[in-house]
Amino acid sequence: MGRETRHPYSALAPLVGALVTLMLGVNSRFSGLVGNLVATLVIHMVGLAAVSAVLLVKGEEARPGRLPAYYYLGGFVGVATVFSSNYVFAALGASLAVALALLGQTLFSVAADATGFLGRRKYPLSARSLPGIGLAIVGAAVIGAAAVGHSVAAGNWRASSLAMLLALAAGALPGLSFVLNSELGRMKGILRSTRVNYLVGLATTLVIVAAVRPPAADAARAVVAAGPFLALGGGLMGVVVVAAMNMIFSRMTAFSATLLLFSGQALTGVLFDVVAEAAFDVRKLVGTFVLLAGLAINALLSRRGRTGGVRRVGDQPKGGAVVSQR
């Protein structure tokens, strides 16, 4: 796929995927103890405090230029991801929801590359890229099939077509959030973009809290009882994930970044299954290697590295945002 997929970012993405798996485990446990809404609120408060502290210590030069308002909505999309995922997990079962979300994010990444979505560099879909993309989707399907095999609620899909469509959309939402945050980070700075993500996400969550009005005293007691690791861990890891994905998605194709992220998540999930449950599902491992094989084939056959995309330095993305050199 060209220079944008070479070291260090192609090596960083699977590591971030592994961290995502750990973060999701911590957040899931925390949500189970305090509730989804309270967990989302605490995670965003911790994340905002952490990235603000880093900015105070490290600093980051402000970059001039006005951007369209939608570039600042990554945090809003992130909150929408949390609540839509909660719904489809309850309606379909966790495994089937994960499988469909995996497919949704893969299809979104292909579309984002092919269309130059939101001003990204455009990588037109060509016949050379189809074998690799197809093989990668097969790999994602194998991982999903393994997940569905463990789901006691997998049969629900027959009566939940709307939930299935929402699950696909929920899979595309993280990709949209990554694209928005990475483009904002490329133009305004990685740390500033990460802070905006948490600030907007916190504001969105506070609006929901104001509407729902969960018992504050009970929520505070539950957070304290959960302990500092669960209360702080997800938010702190989330800052690292968001900042890293801002860098990765601004320097790689969305398709490559998504699949490398999946590989880290899937391999870490296999490891956790072995350690925590003394179980090993060979389908997950096979699916991961098939997915990576699709990425490798796409890199070998694609002409993207030679064409470098259709956008050039100085082009203006939609909305009039200034594009700086990568």
Image (cartoon, rainbow, N blue to C red):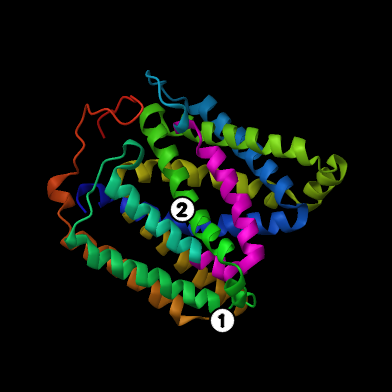
Vertical relation: 237 (above or below) 312: below
- Assign a secondary structure to mark 1: loop
* Amino acid identity at mark 1: Ala
Look at the image and tell me in which quarter the C terminus lies: top left
The one of 320 and 271 positioned closer to us in this rendering = 320
| Residue identifier under label 2 | 172
* Amino acid identity at mark 2: Ala
Vertical relation: 208 (above or below) 33: above
Look at the image and tell me in which quarter the N terminus lies: bottom left
Q: Are marks 2 and 1 in contact (CB under 8 Å)?
A: no
In the rendering, at what x and y percent does residue 173 appear? 49, 49
| Relative side of 3 to 31, left or right | left
Choose top left, top right, bottom left or bottom right for residue 293: bottom left
| Relative side of 48 to 1, left or right | right
Q: Estimate how packed mark 1 is, as few (under 14), some (14 to 19) or many (20 or more) residues with alpha carbons within 10 Å.
A: few
**Range covered by the magenta-colored residues:** 71-99
Looking at marks 2 and 1 on the same chain, the residue that comes earlier in the sequence is marked by 2
Asked if the stretch drawn in magenta spans residue 95, the answer is yes
| Residue identifier under label 1 | 279
The one of 252 and 128 positioned closer to us in this rendering = 128
Q: How many marks?
A: 2
In the rendering, at what x and y percent does residue 128 appear? 17, 62
Vertical relation: 38 (above or below) 60: below
- Assign a secondary structure to mark 2: helix
